Image (cartoon, rainbow, N blue to C red):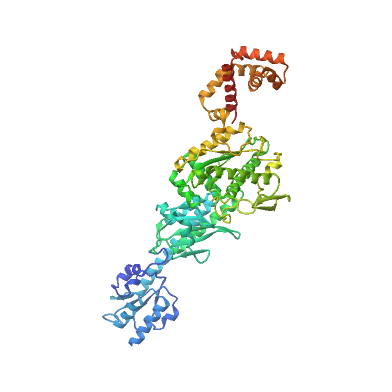
Amino acid sequence: MSAVFPTVREVLALDPVRHGAPRVVAGDEGLDRPVRWVHVAEVPDIATLLGGGELVLTTGIGLPGDDAGLRAFIGDLADVGVSGLVVELGRRYVSGVPRVMAAAAERRGLPLVELRRATPFVRITEAVHALIVDAQLTELRATEEIHQRFNDLSVEGADAAEVIRQVAELSGCPVVLENLSRQVLGYDPAGESAELLLDGWEQHSRRIRPAGRTAYDPDSGWLVTTVGARGQDWGRLLLRWPASGDVPSVRAVEPTAGSPTRLTILIERAASTLALGRLIRRDAEGLERQIHRTLLTALLDHSRPVDEVGLRAKALGVVLDRRHLVGVMVRHRADDPAGEIGPEAGQARLRDLSEAVGQALREAKLTALTSAVDDNSVGALLALPDPAAEDRALSAFASALRRVRLDAGTGRPAPGVEPARAASGVDVSRPASDASRAAVGADPARTGFGVDPSRAAFGVEAARSGVGVDPFRGAGPGAVIVAAGSGVGTLREARRSLVEARQIAEAARRDRRDLPIFRLPHVGLAGLLHLLRDEPRLQTFVERELGALLEYDARHPRERLLDTLRAYLEQGRNKSAGAAAAHLSRPAFYERLARIARILDVDLDSVEASLSLHVALLALEAVRTP
């Protein structure tokens, strides 16, 4: 039954109607028409007083006596759109309705029903109207439940995934949220196949053209509403109805049959919740950026099946299947010291770096998943057509990143940014297009969830905090390290490339060479020790080699014998050079070396002993470096 109006077939099953022994004599195919109201009529020109959807009850005493008049009567009722005609036998027609009436009703598809036993019409109208009112109350309660549920989601700050899940749960239908470029931001297949739902989504979505902000497209079978607020639309929410036209159930207060009205209310309320959530979080990351972070994090910590990551990335416009994948990490050489520029500035610096990486990928025309992966690093998983493109792609990315950051660091607008005025009234640079576009490498004109347009381009926050002039090169606090892992051939191996890139980036922080891309062969011994810094056996080695000296320095902090040993070893065991590096006279330096030899019980003139101590010093620095 419809959630609001019963059908003619259901009215015939009511007890007051069954008491009249009803028999359908014509228009069987129209028995599923909804009955909006019941009207009793005994005059032939009643059609002019009807609005459509009524079930007309009559005894026939006022109907025309000629065949042409009966045909005209049936035609008028069909033209106005009544649900059906019920004729009680006994007063005008005794054995049955005239054949010409039945033939006319059959021809027009109008249900024509005989009541072969006298029945008070008032009982029929009372039963049907009570049914309609009760259904309307049920609809009202269900609608109120929808509003209440989405109000709760808005207050709780639910993310888009939860809103979409609620829509699918309430409707029992597949639901898709897309941006204006027809890229999937989220979906819930409602128990159906996600692969079939999302296969070729962009092309399929472009064929869905509803008329209006919220409308049903009968050709595709999708109910669509636009998502946006304040005149800034950013996506569409789509709900698929069965192609048969049977409206699925909407589980609101209790399982009941759904209605077009209720599903329309459901999808519009969900769209409002999504729009409101975006307005509330307009200073936070865009949803596409969040999805990229979710997928990269899922690869790193195995929180989602690899197949699901690939499917969601493809729906977002980043194809990872049958691609050569390379993990890349970009980070500042120096961490953001807590308490110096504050957590907000630290987050701004990370956002700026993330924006710079995204812009560099777009300039290099590379397709990738990219987002911040921790408090200091921005990760990217490059999807290349074949292994031969790896070196060329990495070089193009590194060059583009340097250009973007140099432009931002010197105050010149980078490509694709335009002047904007910050809240303070000082002109800064901001992205001219939506900086949170997630499908890197896609059409630059595509837009999705934006970021706060007052955000400065990369380098502004750094410049305010005294970062050096060139934010890319050198070892200053603004310097950036770009590290790449080994290329892999499947998505299941992507985690290894990402983890390797992260470890290389951390190890390269001690390397003062000016390399555009750090790879595994570049990290050297210090890098290897940094990768192994959490290994208990390495820590045991450090304690065994240097433990006695560390304890001595702890008791005599002014002597700093560990620094003396480091100067000696870093100068290739040249005592004169070591004394100069330590800013000590040669006698004082020699005396300290003798003391170190006694404390550690080693011969510092021994190449093997000095090598062991030097490795232990490098390992100690790696262990102490976060």
Q: Position of residue 66 (x, y in %)?
A: 33, 88
Q: Is residue 368 left or right of residue 554?
A: left
Above or below, 128 against 523 in this view is: below
Q: Position of residue 327 (x, y in %)?
A: 52, 41
Q: Which residue is drawn at 66% across and 41% down?
A: 345
Q: Where is residue 450 in the image (x, y as percent from the top left)?
A: 59, 52
Pick the residue in front: 298 or 10.
Answer: 298
Quadrant showing the C terminus: top right
Q: Residue at x 73, y 51 (%)?
A: 425
Residue 252 appears in the rendering? no
Q: Position of residue 167 (x, y in %)?
A: 47, 55
Above or below, 453 against 89 in this view is: above
Pick the residue in front: 165 or 376.
Answer: 376
Q: Is residue 527 left or right of residue 309?
A: right
- Farthest residue to the left: give it: 95
Image quarter of residue 82: bottom left
Above or below, 209 against 317 in this view is: below
Quadrant showing the N terminus: bottom left
- Farthest residue to the front: give it: 388
Pick the residue in front: 575 or 115.
Answer: 575
- Tally of numbered discs: 0
Residue 341 appears in the rendering? yes
